[in-house]
Amino acid sequence: MQQDNQPSCEAFRAGFVSMIGRPNVGKSTLVNELIGQKITITAPRPQTTRHRIHAIKSTSCYQIVLVDTPGLHQGIRKSLNRYMNRAAKSALVDVDAVVFVVEANKWTREDEAVARLLSDVKVPIIVAINKVDRVKAKYDLLPFIEKVANKVKAKAVVPVSAYRKINLDALEQEIVACLPEQPAIFPQDYVTDRPTRFLVAEIIREKLMRYLGDEVPYGTTVEVEQMQWDEAAQRWVIHATIMVERTGQKAIVIGEDGRLIKKIGTEARQDIINLLDARVHLELWVKVKSNWSDDDRALASLGYNEV
Ligand SMILES: Nc1nc2c(ncn2[C@@H]2O[C@H](COP(=O)(O)OP(=O)(O)OP(=O)(O)O)[C@@H](O)[C@H]2O)c(=O)[nH]1
Ligand SMILES: [Mg+2]
C-alpha cells in the first residue's frame, strides 16, 4: 500500500475516475504517474491503449480507481477501432468524475469531438492540460487555458506534465475532492483489476507499438498461451503468440536474422521480471490470422469483447 503524506483525514473517500481524451495526449503515462507504478502501457504513437484498465491508488484517506481508456479517435472504421471507441465511451458511465486529458497548446478536431461528448456528462469534469514541459513560458499557456475553459464546463483546469511530474499533486487533490465518502472499493493492496496474463500480453504489445514502424503494430495483438511456474527451475515459463494479419508483417516482426523479435523479447522479459519479481523464461511466436482486426468474431476470441 502506498502512504500519502496527509497525517489525518475527515472521512474516507473512494470512487472511479475516467481518463478520457484523444489518442497520444498522455492518458496512460498520467495514470502510471498518479498511481506511482507502471500498470498501463505507453508509446509515442496514437492508439496504444486498446482496453479499459483500472489502476488503483490507495492511501489511508482515499482510494482512487483511475480508468485508463483508449484514445477516442475518428476516421478509421475497423472493428477494432469501433471496439476501442466503445471501450472509451463506456468509461463515461458509472464514474464519479472524468479527467479530460488534452495536450498543451494543441487543440484538434478530435479534442473538439471529445468536448462535445463530455457536454452530456453529469459528473464533475477536470481538464488536465498535459505536456506543459513543452511550453517555454507559463504565460504562453494562458490563451489555451482560456480556450479549453470555454469548450468544456470544467470544475478545474490543471496544467500538468506526466513526464516531468509537474503539478501531479494538484491534479490528485482535485480528483480526490470529487470522490464520494464511502469505504474502499478494492482491497488496499490491489493496483489493478486485470489478471497478470493480461498485463504480460500488454507488455509485449507495448514493445510492438514502440519498435514497429508505420501501420504494422496496428495489425498486431498478443495472446499469452501458457504461463506456468516451473518449481524446479524457479522461474515463470511464458509462451506468447504475436498475431499479425499478413505474411509480410510476420517477416517484419521477426526482423532480419530474427533481430527484432529478439529485441522485443528481451525488453518485454525485463519488464515482466519487474512485474512478477521473479525469473522469467519467455518464448514468442508469430502467427498470421488474416484480418483479425476487422472481424468481430476474431476480435472477441482475442479478448476484445468486454464492451
Ligand atoms: N513531453 C511530454 N511527453 C509526454 C508527457 N506525457 C506523456 N508523454 C508522451 O506522450 C506519448 C503518448 O503517451 P501515452 O501515455 O501512451 O498517451 P495516451 O493518451 O495513453 O495514448 P493512447 O493510448 O494512444 O490513447 C508518449 O511518448 C509519452 O512519453 C508529458 O508530460 N510531456
Ligand atoms: Mg494510452
Image (cartoon, helix red, strand yellow):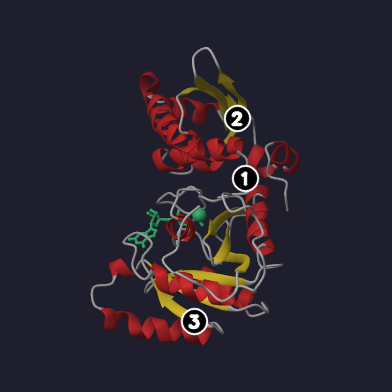
Mark 3 highlights which residue?
156
- Residue 241 at x, y = what percent? 57, 27
Q: Residue furthest left?
A: 136
Residue 127 image label? none
Q: Earlier in the sequence, mark 2 or mark 1?
A: 1
Q: Within 10 Å of the Cα at label 3, are there few (<14), some (14-19), or many (20+) other Cα atoms?
A: some
- Residue 240 at x, y = what percent? 56, 26
Mark 2 highlights which residue?
224
- The image quadrant that residue 296 belongs to is top right
Q: Earlier in the sequence, mark 2 or mark 3?
A: 3
In the rendered structure, which amino acid carries the disc numbered 1? Arg
Q: Earlier in the sequence, mark 1 or mark 3?
A: 3
- Residue 162 at x, y = what percent? 38, 62
| Rendered view: 185 above or below 110 | above
The secondary structure type at the circle numbered 3 is strand
Mark 1 highlights which residue?
194
For image coordinates 47% across by 73% down, the residue present is 173
The secondary structure type at the circle numbered 1 is loop
For image coordinates 60% across by 69% down, the residue present is 12
Residue 286 visible somewhere in the drawing: no
Q: Residue furthest right?
A: 297
Q: Within 10 Å of the Cα at label 1, are there few (<14), some (14-19), or many (20+) other Cα atoms?
A: some
The verdict on label 3 being within 8 Å of ligand 1 is no
Q: In whole angstroms, how far apart are the C-alphas of marks 2 and 3? A: 41 Å
| Residue 276 left/right relative to 294 | left
Which numbered disc, 2 or 3, marks the residue closer to the eye?
3
In the rendered structure, which amino acid carries the disc numbered 2? Val
